Image (tube, coloured by chain):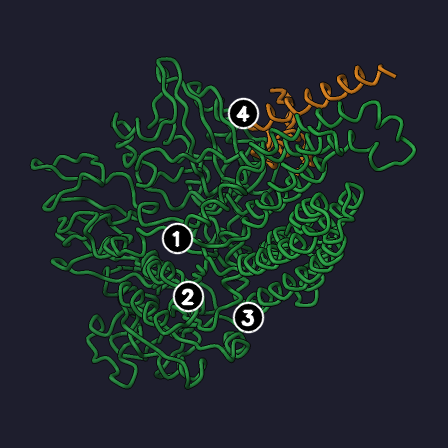
């Protein structure tokens, strides 16, 4: 049914995944596929009448090229593992939620919600696209967890099941408390406002006389839930502050709210006035909006991952008699023999026993070239095997490994201390001092003259001086900044990171993968000039190899591919093939039997080429620095720059040139050394920003004041950090820093605006002229104008900054 | 004029009913995912004989 066609001149795209069919074209059902994997998925879907999948989006599929054997899901049959993953289990049904990062379009949603057509054992599946999750319900009598996962993997949506999933249940229940609080406060505010109307309008004085106390008591009743439920957060936070002998922004708020509430109760009970319940509920409502705004971040992105989020749940262990068994990674012991297949992660530090190991450490170090290991060498956990399956002997338990030891550092165990010196807290401190002074002053002034007036003036000052503007300015400015950054593919963990970024004076970069482009390498050729035909032959031989270096050179060469005979790939050494009776060899210096060119560049990756035993020359791979790096670094002038690299120092001269002579460059840094370096900088009172990408930067990212993880696809990989930056937006880094400094100025300006209101209000209050009418006008106007001012000025500043 | 007592009682209860409805909606998770349902409603109901129209595309 399927026929293989030779690579034609026109490049066809795969009907399933939309990839260009470079290596082969599989034609079936009048459609072309890039590989048999894609074709198989198509056939499976067609059989089950699910081709709507292809109608919703063009080429929605996920490439079927990289697929491991399905036996790797054997561990899911283990009852213990199953129990840890499943969120609900009964005799009749099981419920489970999978994280599927491959999900990308509406076709995906459609197919994943029609899974029951592929496996009748699945009763229901619901997708949450933003979280990239699918919640499944299945009948354990009809199917098993393993069958469900295998099915998902077969159609290209292999769920990500990692060690972190089995570490007890994640209580990822969304926190809805703030919405409840907001709803109740809004309800009470609206109704109290309605009841307060007669006070505002002089014409309804008759109404007020008849119903005054009824309205008053009803307002009181409506304010009770606001006081005890909605506003509770402000009181507890203020109390926490007092206990630690600190003044935070919530203390003046709590004081103001208490003064408002109890004055109002007094007025209603004694019948001396209508109270300020409308101001009270309104204030709480507006401030909760601010809180909600501040809390809303990117819950679809994960900022707190550690190594367990990347490690597999199980690994194949070889028993005495050569039997294979899936064993949970946590139970791995020193001395266990494990088998690691193509594209599998090595879970623990181990010695290579058998097989050709090509370890891709990109996940650990950001280094893109797979490293060759020979038998007897220790392979560190976190590497990914590329190529054939290998046998290893575990030498350290998972938690004791070289990489995982980083997580034993105290940095990772300590809770992040709430930043105390935020603008709002500093301003709040001065605010309450001034308010108390003014209140005390008015008390001193009025007591000898009029005791009743003294009480009125005192409470009025506390009420009117409520720092709602202060508490609103910060969340709104930060919230909008977060959104502006998000639009530019810079995602902050929470709003307080904005303030940290504004204070940064030192920037430390990781080299590989951060300053350099991980997926590209510059290739240069040194040696005898190659003829057109020779280039063609080299390209043809390379086309048969899947080695990343071969692929890179292949892509850089022009020309057609001609048939090659007697092709052989000697893993870890090189390639050989015959074209028109000429023997072409491509590979390492030792493979070609030549002495490597021991110039200055012995540390660089080189690939040698020979024809009929005659050495022609070699290709050298250079790191490619990110586009416009020089310009970016130039823009960061004025800040201390440093580079930490896990790599050797062969690029030192180039880096020094890029970063300037002031910059500190450190090479051959282990993850722990990176962490210590950051600590030293912090000890010298620097505010450090770390930009990194790999797990080896995780310690440094965590240790720094602000850690930015650079990622090529934000949903895939990022170590724990404060912010995730899409690699495409790397050139805007200095703009982001500049903009966060600007937002600090906006906050100050907002404070100034609120100061004007406070001066007006306090002037009236100390004279004892404060009335419900004044509060009714001043309160909403000041809150709303602060919100509007904050919103508009951030928008304006963003436009000017070009973000 | 005493009708006002009744009217306020009615208005507050109606508002309270809406509050309860809102809290129930939040509690049952209706606000947890504000994207997927918008896409889901665009899918055609499957009629096994007729394939879905080709031009019926939703954006993602």
Q: In front: A803, or A594?
A: A803
Circles 4, 1 touching at the beta carbon (< 8 Å): no
The percent coordinates of residue A728 (x first, y second) are 53, 62
Residue that carries the numbered disc 2 in the rendered image: A690
* Residue for point 24% across, 49% down: A346
Total marks drawn? 4
Q: What residue is shown with label 3? A: A734
Residue A444 visible in this rendered orientation of the protein? yes
Mark 3, Cα crowd under 10 Å, few <14 / some 14-19 / many 20+, is: some
Which badge, 1 or 2, comes first in the chain's sequence? 1
Query: Earlier along the polypeptide chain: callout 4 or callout 3?
Result: 4
Among the 4 quarters of the image, the one containing residue A53: top right
Q: Is residue A545 visible?
A: no
Which mark is nearer the camera, 4 or 3?
3
Residue A114 sits above or below residue A410 on the image = above
How far apart marks 1 and 2 lie (CA) works out to: 17 Å
Q: CA distance from mark 3 to mark 2?
A: 13 Å
Residue that appears at 43% across and 76% down:
A641
Q: Which residue is mark 1?
A: A416
Nearest the camera: A461 or A621?
A461
In which quadrant of the rendered view does residue A360 lie? bottom left
Say which colour chain A has: green
Does label 3 lie on the same chain as label 4?
yes
2 or 4: tag closer to the N-terminus: 4
């Amino acid at each position: 049914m399927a026929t293989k066609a030779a690579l034609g001149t026109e490049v066809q795209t795969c009907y399933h995944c939309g990839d260009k069919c470079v290596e082969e074209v599989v034609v079936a059902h009048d459609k072309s596929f890039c590989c048999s994997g894609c074709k198989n998925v198509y056939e499976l879907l067609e059989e089950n009448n699910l081709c709507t999948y292809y109608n919703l989006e063009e080429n929605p599929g996920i490439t079927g090229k990289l697929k491991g054997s399905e036996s790797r899901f054997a561990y899911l049959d283990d009852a213990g593992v199953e129990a840890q993953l499943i969120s609900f289990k009964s005799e009749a049904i099981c419920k489970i939620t999978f994280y599927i990062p491959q999900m990308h379009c509406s076709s995906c949603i459609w197919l994943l919600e029609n899974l029951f057509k592929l496996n009748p054992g699945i009763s229901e599946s619901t997708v949450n696209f933003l979280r990239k999750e699918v919640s499944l319900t299945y009948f354990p009598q009809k199917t098993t967890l393993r069958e469900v996962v295998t099915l998902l993997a077969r159609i290209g949506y292999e769920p990500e099941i990692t060690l972190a999933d089995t570490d007890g249940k994640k209580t990822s229940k969304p926190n809805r408390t703030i919405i409840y609080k907001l709803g109740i406060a809004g309800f009470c505010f609206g109704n109290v406002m309605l009841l307060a109307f007669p006070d505002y309008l002089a014409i309804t004085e008759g109404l007020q006389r008849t119903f005054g106390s009824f309205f008053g008591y009803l307002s009181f009743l409506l304010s009770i839930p606001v006081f005890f439920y909605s506003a509770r957060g402000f009181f507890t936070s203020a109390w926490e502050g007092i206990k630690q002998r600190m003044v935070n922004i919530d203390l003046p708020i709590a004081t103001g709210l208490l003064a408002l509430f109890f004055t109002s109760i007094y007025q209603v009970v004694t019948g001396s006035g209508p109270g300020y319940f409308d101001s009270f509920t309104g204030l709480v409502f507006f401030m909760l909006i601010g809180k909600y705004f501040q809390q809303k971040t990117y819950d679809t992105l994960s900022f707190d991952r550690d190594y367990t989020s990347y490690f597999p749940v199980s690994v194949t262990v070889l028993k005495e008699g050569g039997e294979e068994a899936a064993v949970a990674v946590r139970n791995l012991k020193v001395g266990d023999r494990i088998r690691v297949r193509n594209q599998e992660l090595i879970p623990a530090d181990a010695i290579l026993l058998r097989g050709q190991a090509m370890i891709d450490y990109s996940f650990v170090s950001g280094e893109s070239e797979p490293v060759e290991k020979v038998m007897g060498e220790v392979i560190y956990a976190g590497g990914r095997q590329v190529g054939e399956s290998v046998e290893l002997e575990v030498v350290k338990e998972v938690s004791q490994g070289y990489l995982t030891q980083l997580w034993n550092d105290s940095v990772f165990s300590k809770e992040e201390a709430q930043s105390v010196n935020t603008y709002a807290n500093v301003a709040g401190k001065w605010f309450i001092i001034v308010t108390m002074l003014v209140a005390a002053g008015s008390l001193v002034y009025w007591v000898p003259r009029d005791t009743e007036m003294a009480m009125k003036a005192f409470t009025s000052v506390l009420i009117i001086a409520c720092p709602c503007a202060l508490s609103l300015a910060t969340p709104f400015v930060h919230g909008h900044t977060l959104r502006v950054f998000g639009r530019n593919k810079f995602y902050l963990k929470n709003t307080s990171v904005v303030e940290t970024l504004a204070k940064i004076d030192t920037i430390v970069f990781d080299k590989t993968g951060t300053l350099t482009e991980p997926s590209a390498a510059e290739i240069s050729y040194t040696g005898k000039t190659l003829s057109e035909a020779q280039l063609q032959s080299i390209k043809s031989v390379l086309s048969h190899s899947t080695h990343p270096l071969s692929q890179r050179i292949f892509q850089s060469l022009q020309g057609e591919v001609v048939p090659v005979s007697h092709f052989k790939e000697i893993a870890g050494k090189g390639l050989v093939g015959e074209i028109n009776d000429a023997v072409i060899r491509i590979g390492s210096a030792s493979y070609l039997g030549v002495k490597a060119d021991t110039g200055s560049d012995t540390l660089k990756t080189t690939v040698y080429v020979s024809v009929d035993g005659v050495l022609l020359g070699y290709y050298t791979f250079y790191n490619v620095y990110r586009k416009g790096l020089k310009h970016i670094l130039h823009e960061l002038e004025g800040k201390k720059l440093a580079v930490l690299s896990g790599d050797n120092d062969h690029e030192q001269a180039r880096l020094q040139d890029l970063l300037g002579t002031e910059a500190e460059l450190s090479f051959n840094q282990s993850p722990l050394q990176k962490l210590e370096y950051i600590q030293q900088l912090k000890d010298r009172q620097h505010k450090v920003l770390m930009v990194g990408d790999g797990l080896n930067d995780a310690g440094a990212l965590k240790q720094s004041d602000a850690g930015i993880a650079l990622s090529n696809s934000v949903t895939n990989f990022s170590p724990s950090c404060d912010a995730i930056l899409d690699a495409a937006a790397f050139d805007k880094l200095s703009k982001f820093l500049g903009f966060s400094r600007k937002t600090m100025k906006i906050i100050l300006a907002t404070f100034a605006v609120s100061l004007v209101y406070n001066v007006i209000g306090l002037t009236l209050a100390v004279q004892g002229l404060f009335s419900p009418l004044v509060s009714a006008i001043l309160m909403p106007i000041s809150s709303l104008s602060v919100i509007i001012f904050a919103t508009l000025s951030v928008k304006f500043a963003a436009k000017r900054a070009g973000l | 004029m005493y009708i006002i007592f009744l009217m306020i009682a009615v208005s507050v209860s109606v508002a309270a009913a809406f509050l309860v409805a809102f809290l129930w909606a939040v509690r049952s998770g209706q606000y947890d995912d504000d994207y997927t349902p918008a896409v889901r409603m665009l899918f055609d109901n499957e009629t096994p004989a007729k394939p879905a129209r080709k031009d019926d595309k939703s954006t993602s």
